[in-house]
Image: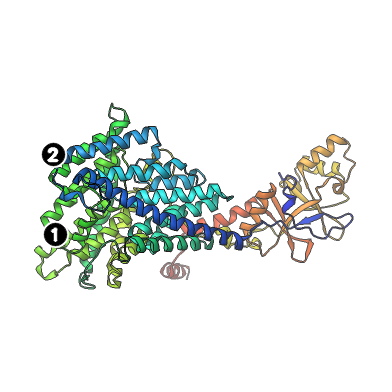
Amino acid sequence: MIEKAQGKENATPATISATGAQVRDVRIANPVEFRMVLMSFLAGGVGLLAGLIAFVLYKLIGLFTNIFFYHRFATNFISAQHTQIGLWIIVTPVIGGIVVGFMAKYGSPKIKGHGIPEAMEAVMFNRSRIQPRVAILKPISAAIAIGTGGPFGAEGPIIQTGGAMGSLIGQIVHTTASERKVLLACGAAAGMSATFNTPIAAVILAIELLLFEFKARSFIPLVIASVLAAAVHMQLLGAGPMFAVANMNFGVPRALPFYLLLGLLCGLAAVGFSKLLYFVEDLFEKLPIDELWWPAIGALGLGTIGYFVPRVLGVGYDTIGDILNGSLAWKLLLIVMVAKSAALVISLGSGTSGGLLAPMFMSSAAMGGVFALVVDKLFPTADLSAGAFALVAMGAVFGAASRATFSFIIFAFEITRDYNSVLPLMLVCVIADGIAMLMMPRASIMTEKLARRGLHIHQDYEADVLHQVRVRETMDASAPTLPANMKVSELADRIARHDPEVSRHQGIFVVNEAGELMGIITRGDIMRALEASPNGASTLLDTATRDVVVTYPDESLHEASAKMLQNNVGRLAVVERGNERKIVGYLGRPGIMAARLKRLEEEHVREPGWMQRNGLQKQKT
């Protein structure tokens, strides 16, 4: 049923005759230019702030690492693998686990995990609002966890913290939920850009995992934030990439068959890692112990592993660099791959705070290096580069596990800045992504945690079909009309007799003798008229709503549906431009849904190909 139009403050009045309808072409206020400029300035501030936060977090991690593993007060970023504290390696991570457990229980549970799923939850289900305490507690808890030996990266906490800062700025300033989402994504992208000095991959990651849109309103601020964060990284941490990588021989095209096998292996590794992580989380959920102590228990397992394989302790950027440069033997690579994976799933599964990217990079790079070295042993003529296969595997495993394949193709390319890496990266990453999609069709390592809480995120995105279809394509060209001088009693009688011309419509347009639009009458209007005058002596023109919202044949269905929603109406008169009294059609909810039906048919209805059509023609003849 059509209700009376609301939202007159947004109306653009048309010419109104003494007895005619007030025809309104309602348009959504959209001062794009000013808001985009404002968002761009705010994004620049977010980018600079995220760059500084990344620098401070690096220094905090360095401070805690030096204090706990080298017993000195210094802030230089150093690996924990060279420590000489003996059995204290087992105890040190437990201290950090206890502190993080108390912070999660009495501060905010949002600090647990690697941060990106929490940012996704804020975007999709909390109107991009993140609590201020998360912006403070997340980097501190991550610095403590990593500084006491946690096998995590700094990038996840920085991404979440940068996103939190963007969200807070969006809450301080007068913004819409969509603008807050853009600022949150800007903070997240800036966090990754400031960590790895990979500004392009950071922008794409924010689009793939947080925005799920590609629009100028979000893309321009994202690029600004990412560039400024990378500039801060260059100024404070150096202009080079995170990993200093020597020239690699990717062996294209002769090595492509081996890259195909690596793609299959990376897809299986992505699925296996995701399932193992959540399997360990389920085991911790079954413990008859307060969750406050879970990070300490996980840290005890980490410390035990770290005692035998110190390379698993801390961020491990130096070990990743060694792997990419082919400096490690295959036995050590195998040990690092297994030990780092075990340390990560035990620690992160316990609910502590830390990033997922760096440890997965290390274990998957080690896997790629082992693969190349084993193939060279079996087929000496293959002459594969362990560093090249490590780099490709590093991007493919995490890209497939997170469903952010494009981001990590670009990420790995930005690390090497070697164009020869593009072909194997593209091939291996998409094969791994296809395997992961087949085996985990409903969730990724990023969304599984949310899915278990009943929060399902659709990570694919495409252009809205309502933007692409015009009103003329789905409107009903035979608009239902009635003469203005008809009595209400006559119309009520026709409805009671189920006259098909009127009974199937909830709203009907009222026209004068010249066929010009005068108003619209609904069944609600008829009931009110009969209550006021039971004999129904009034005319339709006296009863009809004169305030009519219209659309035009060349408008998109998106614009038309927005008019329906804004004005709480279920039908629109389709009129000529320049002659708003002339009705050329009728657009109802079925017309809107017809566009969706058309898209479904395009996706699922198979049309006969040339061979089938030729076969059918021969059968007919």
Q: Position of residue 557 (x, y in %)?
A: 62, 58
Residue beneath the point at 52% across and 61% down: 215
Q: Is residue 423 above or below residue 479?
A: below
Residue 505 vs residue 80, the one in the foreground: 80
Mark 1 is on which residue type? Leu
Helix, strand or loop for disc 1: loop
Mark 2 is on which residue type? Leu
Mark number displayed over residue 87: 2
Residue 171 vs residue 383, the one in the foreground: 171
Q: Position of residue 436 (x, y in %)?
A: 31, 53
Q: Is residue 375 above or below residue 440?
A: below
Closer to us: mark 2 or mark 1? 2
Residue beneath the point at 39% across and 64% down: 231
Q: Position of residue 120 (x, y in %)?
A: 43, 48
Is residue 380 in sight in this rendering? Answer: yes
Q: Quadrant of the N terminus?
A: top right
Helix, strand or loop for disc 2: loop
Residue beneath the point at 21% across and 41% down: 302
Outermost front residue: 73
Q: Position of residue 287 (x, y in %)?
A: 27, 29
Callout 2: few (<14), some (14-19), or many (20+) C-alpha neighbours within 10 Å?
few
Mark number displayed over residue 48: none
Mark number displayed over residue 328: 1
Q: What's the distance in space between the residues labelled 2 and 1, CA to CA? A: 26 Å
Residue beneath the point at 36% across and 46% down: 139
Q: Are the two marked residues, 2 and 1, in contact with CB atoms closer than 8 angstroms? A: no
Looking at the image, tell me whether mark 2 or mark 1 is earlier in sequence order.
2
Callout 1: few (<14), some (14-19), or many (20+) C-alpha neighbours within 10 Å?
some
Corner quadrant of residue 288? top left
Is residue 497 in sight in this rendering? Answer: no
